[in-house]
Image (spheres, rainbow, N blue to C red):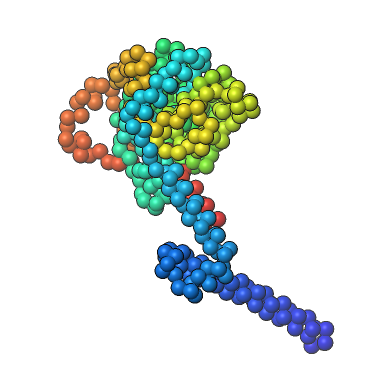
Amino acid sequence: MSRMDANNTDSGFSARATRKAQEKAKIIQRETQKETFKTISKILQKCEGERSQEERSLLHAHQDVVQDLNTRQTRRHLLKRKQEEVFDDVENLKTKVKQLAKAMQQAKHVVIYTGAGISTAASIPDYRGPNGVWTQLQKGRSFSTSDLSRAEPTLTHMCIWMLHKVKMVQHIVSQNCDGLHLRSGMPRNSLSELHGNMFIEVCVSCSPMREFIRLFDVTERTALHRHETGRRCPHCGAELRDTIVHFGERGTLEQPLNWKGAAESAQQADVILCLGSSLKVLKKYSCLWCMNRPANKRPQLYIVNLQWTPKDNLATLKIHGKCDTVMRLLMEELGLEIPVYNRSQDPIFSLATPLSTEEKDSHTRKEIAPPSALEDTSQDPQVQAEATPLQGGWFGRGYSKARRKKKAI
């Protein structure tokens, strides 16, 4: 071996040894920092009077670690407070509802933004409440829900429908995929379902795009970035897609999401009422909040939610109460009757497109039963016992998949 080759070999060994030494030093440093954090954390958990002189010296020597741990603790307490549910007392609730009623009576254009909180009374879970889907999944718990085909519009859905009927509310912007606004009787042109509708599948190959309303949840086979439902358009043969914006996606369809209607209504609104939404997703859509205007020219914002929302500091009024309770008081204050949902008048039965003979076995989800069929089975204990919870679905599968992907990265 020549002297040059020997020098190259030695330098190669030297470089590898240096890299290994550096990596080892980094590992040792991380482990030391970890142990220091554990030690300081245990000391901080003690009362000041119980700390030894040696422990006080350690705290003094590691002020940066103490500050970091205190910051983390403050964040944890803040997050915990944000997740807590707060209830206004009866008198305060009534006073706030009167203020809301007065604002709605004086307004020219009222838009309502709705979230999962308006559907909990229909046994459909919310997302970020104490027992919400996201809350349970973040805790590593599995989640299931009861048969969605038996869900019906709640008191809040029917109050909203009545407010629109008497022209006190001009538009509804909903994050919900449960289709209950449509089933309450809300006309399509006054409804923007930003995250889709579990009963609607569409053909994007047809022009204009065709939609097919079904009597069952069309999202059985769909998930994050996978929207084909397994059925085909009877007009052009293209694959039909769901309309759902799964967790981690943004809306791309113009209908039935109706972004245009939502944006135009927000621009005309002088009052925006938010019902049962954490607003953590809606806050990202700047067109819904008119933030390009001076503060005194934006719509008045009223929020009904038990938990903190990121728009609380911009709200004219925050009402801490359940949606059904608040809406019942509001209708009483406005002197309006609360309509009762009647399944025989549910628009979905007249709007639905029946499946072809070949498509009868294309899904396994239960169909929404007409009134007569529901009466026949509601008293049958065997039918009730056979009802099994649905795993995943449009409300959970995409979220858990996104979390797994994030962890892998």
Residue placed most toward the observer, 259 or 164: 164
Residue 302 percent location from the top left of the image = 47, 26
Residue 111 percent location from the top left of the image = 49, 21
> Seen from this angle, which residue lies furthest top?
166
Residue 217 percent location from the top left of the image = 38, 32
Which residue is drawn at the image coordinates 65% and 77% (left, top)? 21
Residue 84 percent location from the top left of the image = 39, 43
Q: Would you identify the image quadrant in which residue 184 lies?
A: top left
Q: Would you identify the image quadrant in which residue 318 lies?
A: top left
Does residue 243 appear left or right of residue 354 in this picture? Answer: right
Which residue is drawn at the image coordinates 40% and 25% (left, top)? 96
Task: Establish if 17 lies above or below 261.
Answer: below
Task: Establish if 281 lies above or below 357.
Answer: below
Q: Is residue 380 visible?
A: yes
Q: Where is the N terminus found, in terms of image quarters?
A: bottom right
Which residue is drawn at the image coordinates 17% and 37% (left, top)? 382
Question: How many labels, in total?
Answer: 0
Residue placed most toward the observer, 286 or 317: 317
Does residue 227 appear left or right of residue 93 in this picture? Answer: right
Which residue is drawn at the image coordinates 51% and 58% (left, top)? 70
Q: Is residue 160 visible?
A: no
Does residue 150 appear left or right of residue 262 in this picture? Answer: left
Q: Where is the C terminus found, in terms of image quarters?
A: bottom right
Task: Establish if 186 lies above or below 42.
Answer: above
